[in-house]
Image (spheres, grey):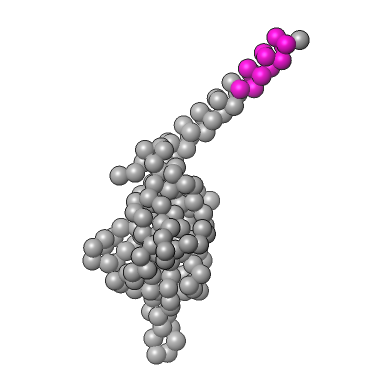
Amino acid sequence: MTKKILNIATKILMFIVIAIAVFMMIFTIFSKLTFDRNDRSLFGIRFYIVLSDSMSPSENNKDEKVHFDAGDLILIKDVKDKTALDDTNIIAFISQNSENFGETVTHKIRERKLDDEGRLLGYVTYGTNTGAIDEALVEPEYILGVYSGKLPGVGMSIGLTR
């Protein structure tokens, strides 16, 4: 009886190991094909690896829901109306700042900037770690999506960081 239980346990363990290996293989292939490409998404979700600690925990950022660290894999969800965002949102966007022009940045919205007629000019964004405001307004056409979650350390563990 003990030998039979051991045999079943071994088969279950082997199945789990194979399932994890297959999942990691598929994930790695998908990752290599799509990371750092803003035009690719899976079911309306884009995946990015965090490269800086501008949104990491600090005295300025103690809210667990709005921080992530370098090496985390973040999920960015497509947003239909890019003009309807507010200071509760964290957005990924193509930076227009001089120091990182054209790079994908994920920061929190601080406020909406409107013209005299009430039309949206863009969003003031900042990294919550330091609270420093980004140099350029984020215009709606540069927004890639809204932050919807993270997988801590996954970017580091699969070796996809720069």
| Vertical arrangement, residue 118 with respect to residue 23, above or below | below
Quadrant where the image shows the C terminus: top left
Is residue 12 one of those drawn in magenta?
A: yes
Give the camera-side residue of 46 and 100. Answer: 100
Percent x, y of residue 143:
41, 65
Prevailing SS of the magenta stretch = helix
Image quarter (top left, top right, bottom left or bottom right) of the N terminus: top right
Q: Nearer the viewer, residue 53 or 93?
A: 53
Residue at 36% in and 55% down: 53
> Residue 56 or 120: which is nearer the viewer?
56
Point out residue 51 in the picture as x, y percentages from the top left corner. 34, 51
Q: Residue at x 41, y 37 (%)?
A: 158
In the displayed image of the protein, which residue is found farthest to the right?
1
124 to the left or right of 147: left
Q: Which residues are magenta?
A: 2-13
Residue at image point 39% right, 90% down: 116
Q: Position of residue 28 (x, y in %)?
A: 43, 36
